[in-house]
Each structure stands twice: as C-alpha cells, then as structure tokens.
Amino acid sequence: MTSARTPCSFWWLNHNSELPPGPAWHPIGTAGFEETEGRITGHHSLRGPAPAWADDLLRLSRAAFLADKLASRKATEDRWTRRLRLSVPASDPDRWAAAAAGPLSSLLRTLTGDLWEISLRPLRPAPRQEPFPADEDWCAREVALFSGGLDSLSWAARRAAESGDGDGVLLLVTFTEKKVEHVLGNVYAGVKALARQSGRELRRLTLAQTNSGGHGKEAEHSSRPRGLLYAATAVRAAAADRVDTVQVPENGQLALNPPLSAARSAALSTRSVHPRTLHLLNAVIRTVGGSVTVENPLAHLTKGEVCRAAVRAGLPLTVLAQSMSCGAPPRQRRPVPYVNCGVCFPCLVRRSGLLAGTGTDPTPYETTPLHPGLSSERSKHWHALRNWLGRDYTVFDLIGDVPLPPGTPAGNWLQVIESGREELRAMVRWAQSEAAGAA
C-alpha cells in the first residue's frame, strides 16, 4: 500500500530564480551540499565544457539525492513508499519532457521504490564557469567510478596495469567522506603503483557527497539515489572529455542484489547498478540526445572472480584488504579502527569473494558473524543469508523482484547468482569451522 498523503514537493533554486508562492514547495539547491559548486561539477579538472544535457542530468541527480534525504519514509502508510515531486530547471525543458515522463521517473522509482513526478522549467542563465585550461594530453580516454570498494579497485587495478601505449588517461571519479577518506587514499596508491609500472597515466576527480544541512535536518537515513549522483557526475566528466563510455564496476552478484527475503526487497536491497537501472539511465541519456553509455564491466563475474582478477593484475593482497565494502562502516558509527564491520550482507559477500578468489581474507573486520556476543540485530544478515542459501533460486525469483531489461538473457544472470551462492556456501562452512576451532 502506498501513501495517499500530499506529495513532498521540492523546487531546485538556480541563478536569480524565485520560489513559487504557497507552502507546498520546499527549496533545495547547491547550498544542500558541503562540496562547492565548482568542485562537484568538475570545472577544475575537466578539459572542455560539458554539454548542456550532461549539466541537466547532474542537476536532476543532485535534486533527487537531496529530496530523498529530506523526505521521511516514516510518515507513509507502508513506512517506505513516498510520493515525491521535483521541479528542476533544464537547458531545454521540451527535450527533457519525454525523459521525465518515461525513463527518468521509472529510473528513480527503480532506485528508491517511490513514486516520482518530475517537471522541468527553463534554466535561467548563470555566470559561466570555464573549465581548467589543459592540452590534449590532459583529456581522458577512459572514465570509471572508483569507490574504494573491492569491485572498483579490481577494475581500476586491471586498467592501470594495462600498457599505457595508446590507452591515454584513465580518469577515476570518486566520492569520499572525511571519516573514511584514508581508505580511498590507500587503495588509490595501490592502483597508482600499477600505473607507474605499466606507464598508464591516471587522473582522479575526488568529490564529497555529504549533505550540508543547508535545507533542514536529514529526515531519511537511506540514500537510494546516491548511485545515480555518482554515475551522473562520471557521465558529465566523460561528456566533457568526449569519452563514449562510463564504467561502473560491480560484481554481478551484488549488481542484481537479490533480496534474501520478501521483507528485504526495498529496504535492504539497493539497485544502483542493477541492469534495469543502467538500462533506464542509458535510455534517459539517449532520449535527451546524449552520447555517453554507462556500462558495468563486471556484470557477469562473481565476487570471487573479481578478487582473482585483481590479484592477477598485480594488486597485493594487503591493498585488497584495505578496501571498503561495508554497508554500515564502524568508523561512521563510532571512532573505532575498522572500516568493515564483517557481518552486514556486503561484508559477508566480501568474505566469500576473498576466500574464493585468493584463498584467504586478511581484512581486519570489527567482528565475526558467529561471535557469541553478537546481538540479534547485527546477526540478522547471517541468518537471512543461511535461510536464502537453503532455498532454490529460480528464474522466477530473478525477474520477479526487479525486471531485467528487454531482450536480456535471464540464464546468464541466473548463472552468476548460482556461482555466487556456491562461494557464499563455502564461506559459511569456513566460518563454522573457524568458530568450532575457537570454541
């Protein structure tokens, strides 16, 4: 059941714009981000100006990110599904009309599980900020997201280890937070070492995604549109440097992110790199005349295969162990020396991948899934995983949760899930053996 309440309405302010009269609209804009406008749009590190459609896409993604954070789910009838209304300025509202009514609203609904209404209005001219002057050697030839997690680290390591002859600059677009920025620095140093050996040139665009609180206190802890904000930033950078493809690396197992139970579908299963999400994002870009395609280069690999590929590229296990996969990093909850809790679902997949791909897992986790003092709240992922592994997983489960894009062979994705389940079963046996040995 969805809420019948009045939609939460958000109006993105732009240069010299005014909020419409009445209490319905809540103003949002650049003041909602701690990062400065110049840095988040990348003017300081892009070779050329971004096309207008890419600026519009980033503005829409930023608006959706803030709206999601400011609208509480607790007020809805099912305590999840909200009705959200956005008014965002665009360079060509007519061009965006078809996207807003079709793939854009579907994209946001797939990401957040909410009902979205998007309206576009003419963009008032703002002072133009010229990009950083640079020569042709500065221009990127390849663009990828780099989160500091195992998957993006593996992909960056593989690309950095490739010979630099003719490959040009590899631009890694990263988002970080102060509490874990050392993680990104450590793993990037590992990638940079491989690039020095191969001769591949690296550039990094590092931004923060923190809400400044400039538009009011956060009402929602979840952040489902965050992946869209990341992707749109990378798309804008690629469009400015005239790169045709943006790589968003995520193993197929977590890209699909099948819910472990019916209760987890929306609340605990994100869709940032789901094949349907990327399909809809690419449909939005094509509808407004864009030329960039977003791809997941690890779509048909398990976590174990991703880890194995990183080691083969020459990345040391010590660097892999410093990456962050956690869905609830301990350092963000309290000051402890850990960045991976070890018991959330992403951490359990991480454990299985490192064991399957390298034979060991040197990650210093905060705790273990079978620790005798673990609370029921923190052990719920382990029990849900065990129950899920004990059931069959069929093609009906695969397409019944979130549909695949038209024409997508379901069998290929089903094989990724089943291979990943075997890695997880092996991890469960290993954990039980370790717990029995410690008893």
Image: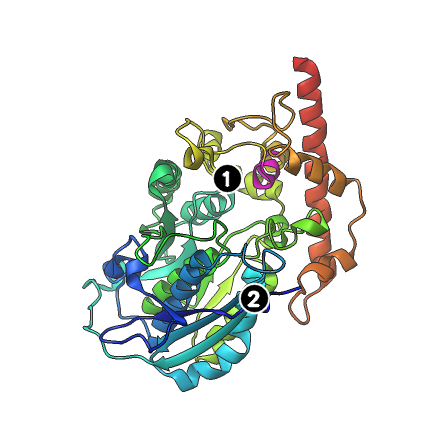
Q: Position of residue 140 (x, y in %)?
A: 33, 60
Q: Is residue 83 among what the camera can see?
A: yes
When the figure is inspected, residue 308 is found, relative to residue 66, above or below; the finding is: above
Quarter of the image where one finds residue 53 = bottom left
Quarter of the image where one finds residue 385 = top right
Q: In the figure, is residue 51 to the left or right of 403? A: left
Q: The residue tagged with tag 2: helix, strand or loop? A: helix
The structure residue drawn at horizontal position 40% and vertical position 75%, both measured from the top left corner, is 87
Q: In the figure, is residue 74 to the left or right of 413? A: left
Q: Is residue 247 among what the camera can see?
A: no
Q: Position of residue 313 (x, y in %)?
A: 49, 41
Query: Disc count in the image?
Result: 2
Residue 429 part of the magenta-drawn span: no
- Nearer-the-camera pick, 287 or 371: 371
The structure residue drawn at horizontal position 70% and vertical position 31%, both measured from the top left corner, is 428
Q: The residue tagged with tag 1: helix, strand or loop? A: loop
**Residue 438: numbered disc:** none
Residue at the extreme front: 23
Quarter of the image where one finds residue 74 = bottom right
- Nearer-the-camera pick, 222 or 149: 222
Q: Residue under circle 2?
A: 109
When the figure is inspected, residue 132 is found, relative to residue 329, above or below; the finding is: below
Q: Position of residue 96 (x, y in %)?
A: 44, 81
**Residue 328: numbered disc:** 1
For mark 2, does the 10 Å Cα neighbourhood hold few (<14), some (14 to 19), or many (20 or more) residues?
A: some
Q: Amino acid at mark 2?
A: Arg
When the figure is inspected, residue 301 is found, relative to residue 119, above or below; the finding is: above
- Separation of disc 1 and disc 2 at Cα? 24 Å
Q: Which secondary structure is most common in the magenta stretch? A: helix
Specify the segment rendered in magenta: 344-351
Q: Amino acid at mark 1?
A: Ala
The structure residue drawn at horizontal position 71% and vertical position 24%, both measured from the top left corner, is 432
